[in-house]
Amino acid sequence: MSRGRRWGIGLLLAAAAGLPGGWAVLVEPGRLVVERTTLVLPHWPAALDGLAVAAVSDIHAGSPHVDAAGLDRLVETVNDTGPDVIVLLGDYVIHDVVGGHFIPPETTAAALGRLHARLGVVAVLGNHDWWLDGQRVRAALEARGIPVLENQVMPLGAPGQRFWIAGIADAWTNKYDVPGTLAHVPVDAPVLLLTHNPDLFPLVPPRVALTLAGHTHGGQVRLPLLGRPIVPSEYGQRYAAGAVREDGRVLFVTTGVGTSIIPVRFRVPPSVSLLTLRAAPAEGERSSR
């Protein structure tokens, strides 16, 4: 084989090897997809069948691709899904990420204040928010009309279609209280639990219809055959992404919008999760099918 041909093959191999890396750094982190999922929930009432929840997490404003224009695109994308309620699951800010820059939480909150849903927008805080200044981030969001729940609850919906939102503090940076928070929800009321870190899920009782979390970014990288090399969770890949069912309880982990530490995403695109919540059929209906 001639030297020139060897060089040519070498260049082709180098280019082929560089394609996934280039995609992971330059292309995929700049995408934004809407992932639509239908969840049949054992503890969800028929009166609320079909409720649409848009879940957004880990915006990390200031990370590459999430500048002012990226925030505007996110808000437009979420609003276009026409959700009944929007839940924001923490980590609105970023500190140290290659190629990023700091965006004040007040700027991010101003953009998020343009979110619209029939029943409103509700938020919790994440570890990055507290590493910056949790009270500042909370104040910025609440100044734009977005309630932030830290071990707090609130009802949503009209009588006959009322459900509760329980927001639990971040597992890494704050004192969380699952039973104490849920004690403020009527015993038989349908409840959605919001928290940033899914590692709290084993503490959630069966009365909660659905737990919603973020934090993991889906690992940011999902390799063929090998899976997700790094997931920031004590449970490894168990709560990395998507729907998880354990002992009759349901968790959904959305994979987030921005990036943290390294500005890379591969086969885990930035996403908004649009969840349609369906009531499980009654026992009589099951047996007749």
Image: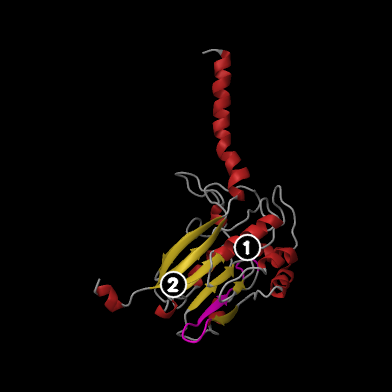
Image position of 249 (left or right of 232):
left
Residue type indicated by callout 2: Gly
Quarter-wise, where is residue 174 in the image? bottom right
Contact, mark 2 vs mark 1 (Cβ under 8 Å): no
Between 226 and 89, the one nearer to me in the picture: 89
Q: Earlier in the sequence, mark 2 or mark 1?
A: 2
Between 276 and 197, the one nearer to me in the picture: 276
Question: Please, is residue 250 above or below residue 216 in the view?
Answer: below
Q: Is residue 19 visible?
A: yes
Question: Please, is residue 186 above or below residue 216 in the view?
Answer: below
Residue type indicated by callout 1: Val
Q: Secondary structure at mark 1?
A: helix
Question: Please, is residue 61 above or below residue 160 in the view?
Answer: above
Q: Which mark is residue 50?
A: 2
Q: Position of residue 21 (x, y in %)?
A: 59, 39
Q: Position of residue 102 (x, y in %)?
A: 75, 56
Q: Which residues are magenta?
A: 157-173
Q: Is residue 231 visible?
A: no
Q: Which mark is residue 232?
A: none
Quarter-wise, where is residue 39 in the image? bottom left
Q: Position of residue 189 (x, y in %)?
A: 47, 83
State the residue position of label 1: 75
Q: Secondary structure at mark 2?
A: loop
Crowd rating for badge 1 (residues with CA inside 10 Å; few <14, some 14–19, many 20+)? some
Q: Position of residue 156 (x, y in %)?
A: 55, 80
